[in-house]
Every structure is written in structure tokens, then in C-alpha cells.
Amino acid sequence: MLFAHLKRIMRLDRLRLRGPNGARDEFHLAAATQNLRKLAKISIARQMTMT
């Protein structure tokens, strides 16, 4: 699901940067964004259960 989410929801179906370094950097940024979104979702869920 994670790769499908990157392609469909985050519109990473085509890389915008050129070359292998650009592609790697763009994918790393997308993965970091995905991890931050997941972390925020978990944090909100924990706060809701604590109250």
C-alpha cells in the first residue's frame, strides 16, 4: 500500500527531477513526507486515547 499511496495520492507517478541523483532525492523526500504523515496520524490517535 505504501508504494501505491506514493504513486496515487502523492502523485509520484512520474519523477520531476532528472538523473539518478535527482530521482533518488525526490523519492527520499516523498518517503520522508509519508513517514511524517504517518507519525502525525499516530500522535493524534494517541492524544485522543489519553483524554
Image (spheres, grey):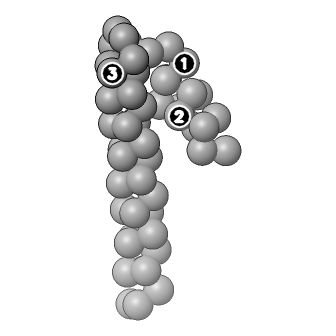
* Earlier sequence position, callout 1 versus callout 2: 2
Nearer to the camera, 6 or 9: 6
What residue is at 41 percent from the left and 90 percent from the top? 50
Q: With respect to residue 46, does 18 lie above or below? A: above
Q: How many marks?
A: 3
**Mark 1: few/some/many CA within 10 Å (<14, 14-19, 20+):** few
Instruction: Say which mark, if any, is on residue 2.
Output: none
Residue 6: numbered disc: 2
Expressed as whole percent of the image width and height from the top left, the position of residue 49 reads 47, 86
Q: Residue 13: horizontal and vertical position, in percent?
A: 54, 18
Q: Is residue 39 above or below residue 46?
A: above
Nearer to me, 35 or 22: 22
Earlier residue among tags 3 and 1: 1
Q: Which residue is drawn at 44% across and 15% down?
A: 15
* Within-10-Å neighbours for mark 2: few <14, some 14–19, many 20+: some
* Residue kind at label 1, given as amino acid type: Asp
What residue would you read off at disc 3? 21
